[in-house]
Amino acid sequence: MENKILNQRQLDELVKLQKERMTTVDPATKRREQAKIFGQQVVKLKLATLPQVNECLRLQAQDPAGKTLGEVMVARGYLKPEDVRVIFRMGSGCYGVNGADTVSYDAAILSQAVGKPVRVWLSRQDEMAWENYGPAFVIDQRVALDASGTIVAWDYESWTLSLGGRPGYNAPGNVVTGYLAGFAPQGVMPRSPAPAPMNFDNGSNTAPSYVTGTVGTRSGGCGVVKSERAVTRTSESPFFTGPLRSPARLQNTFAHECFMDEIAASLKADPVEYRLRHLRDPRLRDVVTALQKIDDGSFGSCERCGEGIAEKRLEALPFARYCIDCQRVVEQEERTATG
């Protein structure tokens, strides 16, 4: 789609087109369409004139830096940042998506309608009733075992769905308010075939902790299973979605650990020992061991002298194996052993 001077009817048609298409596989086209939708809202709210918007659309199309239409309009002096006053109040944080972004958009649009400052305040009940849905997951995993019951191959596939999310600086349609104002949410960008991985990125815990995470000659995983495959598929959701505290990590980790319990049970193996058999990362091994100690009542005791570990040390390092004095001895012994 080429940039051209638009009249109001054409802008309205673009809004309709954008809502029908929702997403596009062409990022440049998507950027241009989003800019025109933004321009329509600017005109509707009487923040700038249609000729000013058209001028900035042309300038944006020539800009190699990829600036948003809003940034171009600010640079031209048509939109004034000093007309916007943001007062920050410290509140409870969140992992995922809550109402913090939505109320800001609500207040901005409502204040333009009434010509006065507006405060939008959601109760906890409001937020729990109307916030984004946590995405559903289907996860299918298989492993291959050798004669000793050790995992030698791990295969993972998942299916989930997504729509919207955090709006950031250039995706107002990611929240419901922005969508109702005419902006499209970020959808799912098809990738077929998927590009070859360049490095091991396990930000969503897609790969289990028990694989080596080898890409090329580099291994970034915490485990010992060398033969591994992880494929995740994401479809566009009919509802706005948001992470359940930690994006996809809860679902993936729950599936991985349940599966490890099932494998250990089928082999009649101790589930903790079986996990440790497949982990090579020292810190993660210590965490698993500490959890076992909590279960058997020995947590907080030094493995070397048997005395209790100082509470402050446990607060700083809950998986500490030794008291501070024994830790110094162990470290000295390790330095002596390595010369």
Image (cartoon, grey):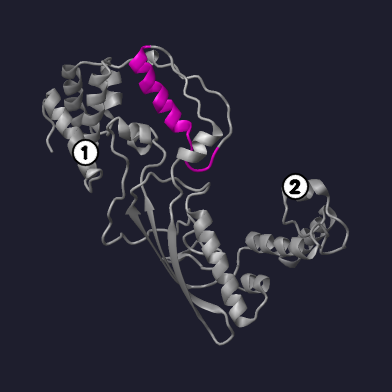
Q: Which residues are magenta?
A: 94-115
* Mark 2 burial class by Cα count in 10 Å: few <14, some 14-19, many 20+: few
Question: Residue 18: which numbered mark, if any?
Answer: 1
Residue type at mark 1? Gln
Kindly report the secondary structure that dominates the magenta region of the rendered protein.
Answer: helix
The vertical placement of 51 against 284, above or below, is above
Report the side of 207 relative to 287 (left or right).
left
Residue placed at 28% from the left, 30% from the top? Answer: 68
The vertical placement of 6 against 331, above or below, is above
- Considering the numbered disc 2 on the image, is that residue within a helix, a strand or a loop? helix
Q: Quadrant of the N terminus?
A: top left
The residue beneath circle 2 is 315
Q: Is 55 included in the stretch rendered in magenta?
A: no
Question: Residue 224: which numbered mark, if any?
Answer: none
- Name the one closer to the observer, 329 or 264: 264
Q: Is 98 included in the stretch rendered in magenta?
A: yes
- Name the one closer to the observer, 219 or 70: 70
* Mark 1 burial class by Cα count in 10 Å: few <14, some 14-19, many 20+: many
For the residues labelled 1 and 2, the Cα–Cα distance comes to 52 Å
- Name the one closer to the observer, 17 or 67: 17
Count of numbered circles on the image: 2
Residue placed at 54% from the left, 70% from the top? Answer: 259
Quarter assignment of residue 148: bottom right
The picture places residue 266, in percent across and down from the top left corner, at 59, 80
Quarter assignment of residue 282: bottom right
Residue placed at 51% from the left, 68% from the top? Answer: 211
Residue type at mark 2? Glu
Q: Quadrant of the C terminus?
A: bottom right
The vertical placement of 116 against 196, above or below, is above
